[in-house]
Amino acid sequence: MENFIAYNPVTLHFGKNILTTLGPTLKEYGNRVLLVYGKGSVKKSGLYDRIMDGLKLQGFEVSEYGGIKSNPVIEDVDAAAAIGREHQSDVILAVGGGSVIDSSKIISVTIPVENSGWDFFTGKINAAKAIPVVAVLTLAATGTEMNPFAVVSNHALGQKSAYGSPLTFPKHSFLDPGLTLTVPRDYTAYGVADLIAHCFEAWFGIGETTLTDRFVISIVKEAMEYGPKLLADLQNYEYREKIMFAATMALNGMTMYGRSTGDWGVHSAGHCLSLLYDVPHGASLTIVYPAWMRHFKTQAGHRIVQLGSGLFDETLTADETIDRIEAFFKSLGCPIRLSDLKIPGDPGQPLFESMVHNKVNGGNLKMKEEDYRALIGLYL
Ligand code: NZQ
Ligand code: ZN
């Protein structure tokens, strides 16, 4: 086992109708709220009106920034930070999926400085002060609600990068599984895939830790059992609840106890697909993961076999394990080859260049340019 520090300061509010305490929670931080949301799902579902009416009734001053796109971009972060600065926001209320919450984390550290939020990603500056973020999660997938990470794209520079600091944890996250009932089938499936991929990234990291391995296997088994049930019954609250809980646990630190790093090479490679072709995050992972395991099956063969017996309760070879995992992703309706997405032209070379430019790599299994070519060849 590797030495580790466990730290997670997020207060998680989980369950049916949990939003009743949202107002008093926001009041802890002040009266001026910057409400951040996405492209329109919150308006369509009625959540926007519910929250806005509640905030006004409770005497909050609300400014807002809507329109954060999936695979969020730095321009929106900077524009929202300017609004927060102008209105001297006391607290950011992020209502949406990972894209909205990630953007809000960077908005929170950008408001107190004159820089672009991108300067955090390049390492030009580090977070010294943050406006508190309170999140209302509407999509189970990323785990952002209980971690400090934020992933944002800068298309002008051709980069999709991650940033995290002890200051970028949300202060509170509200998780009502009922708010995810409107998530369409495709994004529900991508969420299940994403949470499984987070477990795999931890699994292929550095550090032998049997207890944490059991956490990982349990979370993935939960997702493999209830993910398909949910996809067959999207209005089922109980299945929504199980997947939401699993997604939060998959990336809140507990799968990393006793490990010095996860791998994250698949995420790193997947970000290039999202950057170039706006592939939804979870879909990028179902394309890259089977290819990555095939590519590294010699170096990581032992761990792939262990994963197979843990997940499927029988002795499988590495190849059989990979085939089963790929078949599972396919059964969710997720793409498993880039060709499934029917991208025009030949994406191979642009992807290779993007991987070089973004210095795609794993924390454990290192990748060089020849690995990029092999990997792309396996998933095109
Ligand atoms: O924009 P709106 O209209 O809100 O629609 C969104 C969007 O189109 C929609 N949606 C969200 N909640 C909904 C809903 N539609 C109906 N009903 C609801 N209740 O779903 C679409 C996808 O939303 P998005 O927030 O983009 O999805 P997700 O939560 O998967 O977030 C993806 C982003 O998170 C990053 C990804 O790279 C990607 O940029 N990640 C963040 C991580 C973290 N912070 O720890 C880790 C992950 O590995 C990941 O990299
Ligand atoms: Zn992910």
Image (cartoon, rainbow, N blue to C red):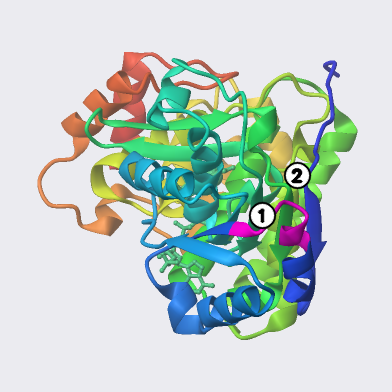
SS of the residue at dot 1? strand
Q: Which of the marked residues, 1 or 2, is nearer the chain's N terminus?
A: 1
The residue under the point 73% across, 47% down is 171
Please give the residue where the numbered disc 1 appears in the rendered image. 134
Residue extending farthest to the right is: 211
Amino acid tagged 2: Ser
- Place of residue 191 in the rendered image (x, y in percent of width and height, measured from the top left): 55, 59
Q: Residue 248, labelled with which disc?
A: none
Please tell me which residue lies in front, 276 or 370: 276
Please tell me which residue lies in front, 72 or 367: 72
Is residue 26 located in the magenta-colored stretch of the structure? yes
Task: Answer above or below: position of 199 versus 167.
Answer: below
Task: Answer above or below: position of 333 versus 208.
Answer: below
Q: Quick check: which quadrant has ligand 2? A: top right
- Work out how far the residue at label 1 is from the one at label 2, CA to CA, in angstroms: 40 Å
Task: Answer above or below: position of 102 versus 128.
Answer: below
- Place of residue 31 in the rendered image (x, y in percent of width and height, measured from the top left): 66, 59
Q: Residue 309, labelled with which disc?
A: 2
The residue under the point 78% across, 73% down is 18
Q: Quadrant of residue 124?
A: top left
Task: Answer above or below: position of 331 versus 247.
Answer: below
- Place of residue 278 in the rendered image (x, y in percent of width and height, measured from the top left): 30, 50
Number of labels in the image equals 2
On the question of residue 273 being in view, the answer is no
Amino acid tagged 1: Val
SS of the residue at dot 2? helix
Q: Quadrant of residue 244?
A: bottom right
- The quarter in which the N terminus is drawn is top right
Q: Which residues are magenta?
A: 25-32
Q: Is mark 2 within 8 Å of ligand 2?
A: no
Q: Residues within 10 Å of mark 2 (few under 14, many from 20)?
A: some
